Image (cartoon, rainbow, N blue to C red):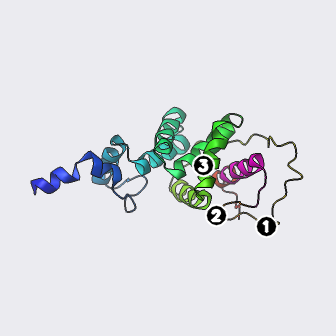
Amino acid sequence: CKAFHRTANDNYILGHVSLDKVPVIPWRSPKQAFFLEKCKETGHPEALYREGVVQYFSFAKVGEGLNCLNSAAKVGHVGAAYVLGVILLCIEEGGEGRRLLNYVKSKKGIGESRKKFKDVINRLWLNNFLEPKPNACPMQAQHKRKQRWPSDDDDDNDVSCEACGCHLQVIFVCNLLRGIVTY
């Protein structure tokens, strides 16, 4: 049907359609790959997020990965804001990375972002890793957490210091990328 075909190719539809059933990298289906590419071209936040993670961590195309994650974060994709915030904290000191992680925390999205990121990277061959910078908090010993391991669904409301909370997220992601069990 021509009307259905026109509707399916509408930029608004492609920018908002659910990608839950589309694999992160559609190796076996050229049709799914074409569909995912069209979604990215329309600025679909989830498609941009996936592409950013794949480009940064699998293909080691740092600039392309950061651009995709930044584009997705700008339109409110919480997972992209989380990953971009962690990357920026590993690259530079404080600033934008902390702001992004505080945004994710304000949306109560830490746990969901961790789960989503873990799900995506478990489907990739990783070629790019992150190195955490030392915790910038001069009083980190006084900023105690509950005595337990953080879990995937933990929004870390028990960390009193912004720097310590952000550093905890960086350590979580760095350990996850290296295959170290963090919960």
In the rendered structure, find residue 152 and report the number of the disc placed on it: 2
> Residue 131, can we see it?
yes
Read off the magenta span: 158-173
Q: CA distance from mark 1 to mark 3?
A: 25 Å
**2 or 3: tag closer to the N-terminus:** 3
Quarter holding the N terminus is bottom left
Is the C-beta separation of discs 1 and 2 under 8 Å? Answer: no
User: Which of pointers 1 and 3 lies earlier in the amino acid sequence?
Assistant: 3
**Residue 21: in magenta span:** no
In the image, 112: left or right of 38? right
Magenta-colored stretch includes residue 166: yes
67 relative to 174, above or below: above
- What type is the residue that disc 2 sits on? Asp
Rate crowding at label 1 as few (under 14), some (14 to 19) or many (20 or more) other CA atoms within 10 Å. Answer: few
Q: Residue 120's x, y, as percent? A: 51, 55
Label 2: few (<14), some (14–19) or many (≥20) C-alpha neighbours in 10 Å:
some
* Percent of width and height locating residue 20: 40, 61
| Circle 3: residue type | Tyr
Q: Nearer the viewer, residue 177 or 80?
A: 80
Amino acid tagged 1: Arg
Q: What residue do we see at 63% from left, 37% from top? A: 96
| 157 vs 80: above or below | below
Q: Nearer the viewer, residue 60 or 78?
A: 78
Q: Alpha carbon of mark 1 to alpha carbon of mark 2: how far?
A: 13 Å
Q: Callout 3: 10 Å neighbours few (<14), some, many (20+)?
A: some
Query: Mark 1 or mark 3, which is nearer to you?
Result: 3
Q: Which residue is mark 3?
A: 103
> Can you identify the residue that label 1 sits on?
148
Q: Main secondary structure of the magenta part?
A: helix
Q: Quadrant of the C terminus?
A: bottom right
| Proximity of marks 2 and 3: CB atoms separated by less than 8 Å | no
Task: Look at the image and tell me whether residue 129 can be seen.
Answer: no
